[in-house]
Image (spheres, rainbow, N blue to C red):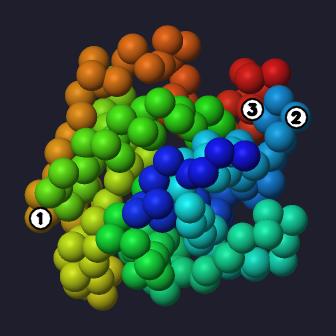
Amino acid sequence: MTAPVFQDITGIVLVGGKSRRMGQDKALLAVQGKTLVERALEPFQQAFAQVLLIGDRPERFAGCRLPVVPDLYPGSSLGGLYTGLYHARTEHVFVTSCDLPFPNPAILRYLCNARGSYDAVIPCSSQGAEPLFACYRKSCLDTMRNQLQEGIFSISTACSQLHVRQVPYPDIAPFDPAGTAFLNLNTPEDITLLS
C-alpha cells in the first residue's frame, strides 16, 4: 500500500446524521456492494495519514477500525465539522458527509492542493457551493464555535465570515466526467436510481 498523499491533512467523515428522510442509517447503507461509509473511506485512507469518523454510537463503526469522535455540538453538519477541526492534529482537515456515494479522489486532491492561505477551499457544483466535500483550516474554529454557541447551524453563514476560495465547477468538471462527484443520497428513491 502506498503512503498517503497528504500527511498534513486529516480526513473527516461525518457519520452522525439522523437520516430522517432515508428512514435508516445512511452511513451503513449499501450502494453497489459497499456501505456509504466504506465508499467514503477508500479515497480518504489513500489520501490522508489520519482519518476520523465524527458521530455518535461508535459501536456502529467498530469494523472501520478508526477513531469515532462524538459531536461537541450535536445535531448539525457544522457541529460535526467543528468537532473534526477541533480534534484534528493537523492544521487542515478535508471533510465529507457519508451520503456522497462517489467521493471523487481527483477533485479531493485538486482542492487540497489549492488550499494556500485560505480558511477554506470549497468546490461548487451545478447546485452551488458544496461545503461538505471541502478543505478547512483550524483558523475557522473560533468563527464556527461562536456561531454554534448562538444556535446558528449554517456552514455557509460561517463561511461568509471567513477567507474562502470557492472553486467553480468548470475548474473541476474535467475530473468528473460522469457528473456524480456531488450526488447526494437522501431518500430511498435516490438509492433506487443507482440500482
Nearer to us of marks 3 and 1 is 1
Q: Are marks 3 and 2 in contact (CB under 8 Å)?
A: no
Q: Position of residue 156 (x, y in %)?
A: 26, 56
According to the picture, the residue beneath numbered tag 2 turns out to be 33
Q: Counting other residues with Cα less than 10 Å from the Cα at mark 2, is it few (<14), some (14-19), or many (20 or more)?
A: few
> How far is mark 2 from mark 1, CA to CA?
41 Å
* Label 1 crowd (10 A; few <14 / some 14-19 / many >=20): few
Q: Whole-percent x and y of residue 36?
A: 72, 46
User: CA–CA distance between discs 3 and 1?
Assistant: 36 Å
* Circle 1 residue: 161
Considering every residue shown, the one lying at the far front of the view is 2
If you read the primary sequence from the N terminus, does the residue marked by circle 3 or circle 1 appear first? 1
Q: Is residue 127 visible?
A: no
Picture residue at 29% right of the left edge, 83% below the top:
145
Q: Is residue 164 left or right of residue 86?
A: left
Amino acid type for the residue under numbered disc 1: Gln
Q: Residue at x 60, y 82 (%)?
A: 70
